Amino acid sequence: MIEIERKFLVTSNAFKTEAYKKTRIIQGFLSTNKKRTVRVRLKGEQGFLTIKGESSVNGLSRYEWEKEIPKTEAKQLLKLCKKGVIDKIRHEVKVGSHIFEVDEFFGKNEGLILAEIELTSEKESFSIPNWLGKEVTGDIKYYNSQLSKHPFTKW
């Protein structure tokens, strides 16, 4: 239940031609406390409730618990969320033996594109595609919970 993840800015739309899957995601936050973030997500036709703990000092890992919930319940819970719903399309791109989840944001975060890769250890190596830019792992302003409060278009 420990998530190890690295996050990067994306420098071009080249990833779109490499994506094998894309899914619309709408998500809101019941809590954005850095010690315990509680997220409600509609991912395509599925609903999810996720609780994340505080990030490690380097921002690479943190506790994550996720449970699939009925879509109808996720829609109801989204109505209880704090202001600032996140709207994005997730593109899944296989690079080497890993999958990058590339999030293209809309609404108040329009123009922001982030790529995440989940790893099995903090030291694990991976192939770097040519559309991958600056690493922003651990930079709190790129956390979805913060983007819901301080959107990219307001920076």
Image: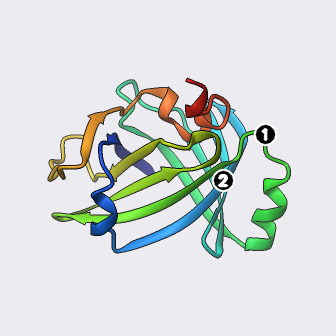
The quarter in which the C terminus is drawn is: top right
Please name the amino acid that badge 2 sits on: Gln
Residue 105 percent across, percent down from the top left: 53, 49
Quadrant assignment, res 29? top right
Label 1 crowd (10 A; few <14 / some 14-19 / many >=20): some
> Which residue is pictured at 41% across the width and 45% down the height?
114
> Which residue is pictured at 52% across the width and 68% down the height?
23
Q: Is residue 19 above or below residue 40?
A: below
**Disc number placed over residue 27 in the picture, else none:** 2
In this rendering, position of residue 25 left or right of residue 63: right
Residue 4 percent across, percent down from the top left: 36, 46
**Disc number placed over residue 101 in the picture, else none:** none
Quadrant assignment, res 67? bottom right
Label 2 sits on a secondary structure element that is strand
Residue 33 percent across, percent down from the top left: 66, 30
Identify which residue, 138 or 153, lies in the foreground: 153
In this rendering, position of residue 150 left or right of residue 126: right
Quadrant assignment, res 57? top left
> Which residue is pictured at 55% across the width and 33% down the height?
152
Identify which residue, 117 or 128, lies in the foreground: 128
User: Residue under circle 1?
Assistant: 82
